[in-house]
Image (cartoon, rainbow, N blue to C red):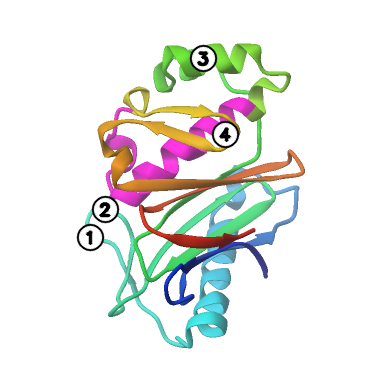
Amino acid sequence: MNTLLSGYEKNTQILAFRVYAEQLDDSCRRQDHHKAHFAALDLLSAALAEDFGVHHAVIRREGLGKPKLIHDFLHMNLSHCKGLAVAAVGRVPVGVDAEAPRQVKDALMRKVCTEQELAAIAAADDKMLAFSRFWTLKEAYAKFTGKGIALDFSSLGFTLDPAPVFHHPAAESVQFYQILLENQHVVSLCVPRGAYTVKK
């Protein structure tokens, strides 16, 4: 289990949120979705025990809503992609997404990106990495809100300079962190806006 990012409340230095990752067999394909999902759950269990002293946890999903940790003060979110499983745990709500840059159709880019994002992708040396950076930010926010793909991703505008900047009415209430893992994976996190000391 690797720690990618830790956020502490500035005033108290109490752990506010943490993102964990575990590498998966690179040969994982779509048929191994369940294997990757269980790897993310195992990662969550280890994180809860090691950093929060929680050894028995229940996760509940109502309908198609966001899975929730049944706990008095802890929140969680999971993600996985080819080669990586990720878990985020916090004393504040969290939304996390991970992607391995890959080829995507232009039609998908036009559907989920703003004109400014499309221009930034077109100008980038690594277009798939640039798209993954925007995509994971949108996914992290969608998972944070619990609305998922019901959100219109093209209405969620970001710039990367180099830290993510959210151009949306909700920007005053949330903040984002993004980690690039040797250009092989992109991990994005959304949390409520606050005063945090962050260590990557």
How far is mark 1 from mark 4, CA to CA? 29 Å
Tag 2–tag 1 contact (CB < 8 Å): yes
Dot 1 falls on a residue whose secondary structure is loop
Q: Which residues are magenta?
A: 130-152
Label disc, if present, on residue 133 of the rendered structure = 4
Q: Label 1 is placed on what type of residue?
A: Glu
Nearer the camera: disc 1 or disc 4: 4
How far is mark 3 from mark 4, CA to CA? 12 Å
Left or right: where does residue 198 sit relative to residue 73? Answer: right
How far is mark 2 from mark 3, CA to CA? 30 Å
Label disc, if present, on residue 118 of the rendered structure = 3
The quadrant holding residue 42 is: bottom right
> Which is more N-terminal, label 4 or label 2?
2
> Which is more N-terminal, label 4 or label 3?
3
Q: Residue at the spot x=43%, y=77% of the render?
A: 12
Q: Which residue is mark 2?
A: 65
How far is mark 2 from mark 4, CA to CA? 24 Å
Viewer-nearest residue: 135 or 8: 8
Left or right: where does residue 194 sit relative to residue 147? Answer: right
Q: Residue at the spot x=41%, y=47% of the render?
A: 175
Tag 3–tag 4 contact (CB < 8 Å): no
- Placement of 70 over or under 65, stated as above or below: below
**Dividing the image into 4 quarters, which one contains the C terminus?**
bottom right
Dot 2 falls on a residue whose secondary structure is loop
Q: Label 4 is placed on what type of residue?
A: Arg
Q: Which residue is mark 1?
A: 62
Estimate the x, y position of residue 89 in percent, counting from the top left: 46, 67
Tag 2–tag 4 contact (CB < 8 Å): no
> Which is more N-terminal, label 3 or label 2?
2
Q: Label 3 is placed on what type of residue?
A: Leu
